[in-house]
Amino acid sequence: MVQSIKINSILRLRLYRLLLGWGSAGLAYHIGRRYTASPIIIPENALDAVIAFNPNAVWVYLSFFILMPYAYLNCQAKRLLPLQLAMQFAAVVSGVVFVLCPTTLIYPVIVGDGTSTSTSLLKALVWVDSNKNCLPSLHASLTLISVWALWQPRRMLQNTLYVLWAVFIIFSIVQLRRHLSLDVGAGLLVGFMAIILLNLTVVKAKISHKN
């Protein structure tokens, strides 16, 4: 009975952190979608031209929505609060950019008669998604932050699988033209900034505690 209560308490805490962390990103995305001026069109570059548009990438792209709760439910306890804070940092930075400098891209025409599951799923995704909020890519930021939170020393096979998962997700973002490589690069930069800031804060706290 006591063990069951303890497990439920831990699960509730992790779900609470998930709501605050991932939810803040959703709020930033919503604000950028609703309260921005006419967006600037970001042109494709040479790297984007090399990566062909492929509706089948939608399955990998949507696995992002599995990675997010997975990270909160499976990261080490000491990484749970930093995971939430890093996502909130990324959400705030991205939200400010979404409002002050809204961006979009020229989206490809999705060809299909509805018989392809991938094409139908992509059309549904486009219908609920925003045609703004391109730069920076929160999809890329949160993917990087999630893998950082899941990373554990001396578990190289597990870490490698997480990294591969993240790489496939990030590649699929450009494949589907939900973002361009410039957006993804900016998103990764925001993610790295969040991680570095959290690491510096932890180091500073440890030094202050020793003194």
Image (cartoon, grey):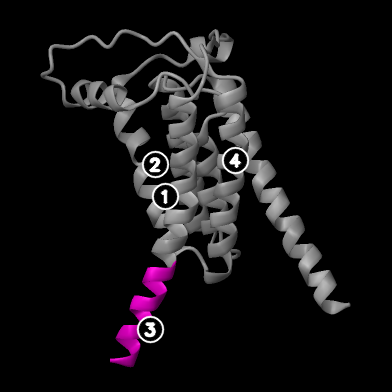
First reached walking from the N terminus: tag 1 or tag 4: 1
Looking at the image, is mark 3 or mark 2 nearer the viewer?
3
Residue range highlighted in magenta: 1-13
Looking at the image, is mark 1 or mark 4 nearer the viewer?
4
First reached walking from the N terminus: tag 1 or tag 3: 3
Q: Are marks 3 and 2 in contact (CB under 8 Å)?
A: no
Q: Looking at the image, which is closer to me, 27 or 68?
A: 27
Q: Which mark is residue 6?
A: 3
Residue 198 sits in which quadrant?
bottom right
Q: Is residue 4 magenta?
A: yes
- Taking 209 as reference, is 59 above or below it? above
Q: Main secondary structure of the magenta part?
A: helix
Q: Image quadrant for the C terminus? A: bottom right
The residue beneath circle 2 is: 64
Q: Are marks 4 and 2 in contact (CB under 8 Å)?
A: no
Q: The disc labelled 3 sits on which kind of residue? A: Lys
The residue lying at 44 percent from left, 26 percent from top is 33
* Residue 126 left/right relative to 146: left
Q: Residue furthest bottom?
A: 2
Q: CA distance from mark 1 to mark 3?
A: 23 Å
Q: CA distance from mark 3 to mark 2?
A: 29 Å
The residue beneath circle 1 is: 68
Residue 118 in percent (x, y) is at: 22, 25
Q: Secondary structure at mark 4?
A: helix
The residue lying at 33 percent from left, 84 percent from top is 5
Q: Are marks 2 and 1 in contact (CB under 8 Å)?
A: yes
